[in-house]
Image (spheres, rainbow, N blue to C red):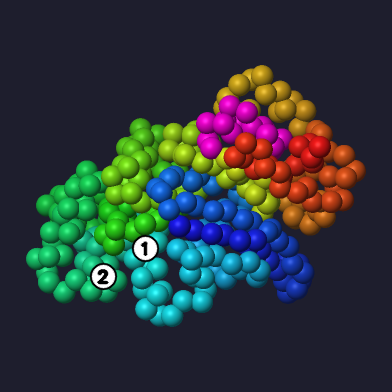
Amino acid sequence: LLHINNVTKLFGYGLLGLRKFRALNNVSLTMPIEPEILVIVGETGSGKSTLLKIILRMLVPDYGTVLYKGKNIFKMKSSEVRWYRQEVQAVFQDPFETFNPLRPVVDYLNDTLKYLLKVRNASERKTLIDQTLRFVGLSLEKVDGKRSNEFSGGELQRISIARALLSRPKLLLADEPVSMLDASLRVDILNILKDVKENLKTSIIYVTHDILTAYYVGDRIAVLYRGDLVELGPITKVYNEPLHPYTQLLLSSVLEPSLDIRKKVKPLKRSTIELKEFLLQGCKFAMRCPYATKKCYETPPPEIKINGRAVRCWLYVT
Ligand code: SF4
Ligand code: MG
């Protein structure tokens, strides 16, 4: 379905932004044609939102390619771009930012049908809107005539999912879709995402910093650290036996206390470390890693494949 090949995105910093750091460094990822939920986990500054923006064609990578069903998404003709927008849709973190409070939310759903899908018949549009809203546990009757401020955050996030589903996309990108919601509402939204995969056969890239919701929805997980994809694999395997020291650190906060890496990792202030880490020649995690050697600082670790999993760390180079 999706082939991300060696994607690198540079951003400027310093005076006039003339110096560059790699917000994404040589990231490669493949999604199969069979529906799956791929979770991309990382903290602020890991590059996960940058990657989503690239897949949405909102940012152009400096190097590398992104192929969707074999087509380079940055070399599409305008007719292909429209097709791509139907195939690949997104849901964002804050549903209140998606909808202007002065407009009835149904207008947004109508617009998608009118302009993206060219459904000209109004009663046909109503039927499609009602069907799609029912899929997320609402209905046209419940939504008609209301504006965004008349809904709860959970309801509004359902409506934004419905809007994204109107074109029956094959890939849905979800950027922290539950992080603004009360914990009690999160599971409902996550269950809708699972339904989308099971029943609509839509693949999902779910981006989050929250490894608990990641585990709940994910089939596979990709872990990003400072622009590097450090670990990739089936989610149960990665959670049972995280290979990369950074993944071990992430999981130690919620899972097995036996993962004693937390005690070993050197705490460093984020503000002082961030750019330095990005600029490291070798492994970006070296400044925090208890196992770091001289080589880790000097040479980027290669990607090692182990039983259908991948990890970027010198510890696994034999
Ligand atoms: Fe730690 Fe070295 Fe592995 Fe990086 S490559 S995670 S510094 S052991
Ligand atoms: Mg983000």
Instruction: Look at the image and tell me whether residue 167 can be seen.
Output: yes
* Type of the residue with mark 2: Leu
Among all residues in the image, which is located at the extreme top? 258
- Contact between marks 2 and 1 (CB within 8 A): the answer is no
Above/below status of 259 relative to 13: above
- Tell me what residue is drawn at x 31 percent, y 64 percent: 100
Q: Give the residue at mark 2.
A: 117
Q: Please state the horizontal and vertical placement of residue 190, each as a whole percent of the image.
A: 37, 40
- Tell me what residue is drawn at x 82 percent, y 55 percent: 281
Q: Please state the horizontal and vertical placement of residue 231, each as a whole percent of the image.
A: 64, 42
- Tell me what residue is drawn at x 61 percent, y 61 percent: 5
* Type of the residue with mark 1: Glu
Q: Nearer the viewer, residue 30 or 122?
A: 30
Mark closer to the chain start, 2 or 1: 1
Q: Please state the horizontal and vertical placement of residue 313, each as a whole percent of the image.
A: 75, 42
Image check: 25 left or right of 73? right
Dot 1 beta carbon under 8 Å from ligand 2: no
Above/below status of 260 relative to 301: above
Question: Which dot marks residue 76?
Answer: none
Q: Say if the magenta span includes residue 286.
A: no
Q: Nearer the viewer, residue 70 or 170?
A: 70
Residues drawn in magenta: 234-251
Q: How far apart are marks 2 and 1 (CA)?
A: 11 Å
Secondary structure under the numbered disc 2 in the rendered image: loop
Above/below status of 114 relative to 247: below
Report crowding for label 2: few under 14, some 14 to 19, many 20 or more residues within 10 A (C-alpha).
some
Q: Is most of the magenta stretch helix, strand or loop?
A: helix
- Tell me what residue is drawn at x 9 percent, y 66 percent: 123
Quadrant of residue 309 within the rendered picture: top right
Instruction: Look at the image and tell me whether residue 250 can be seen.
Output: no
Image check: 203 left or right of 130? right
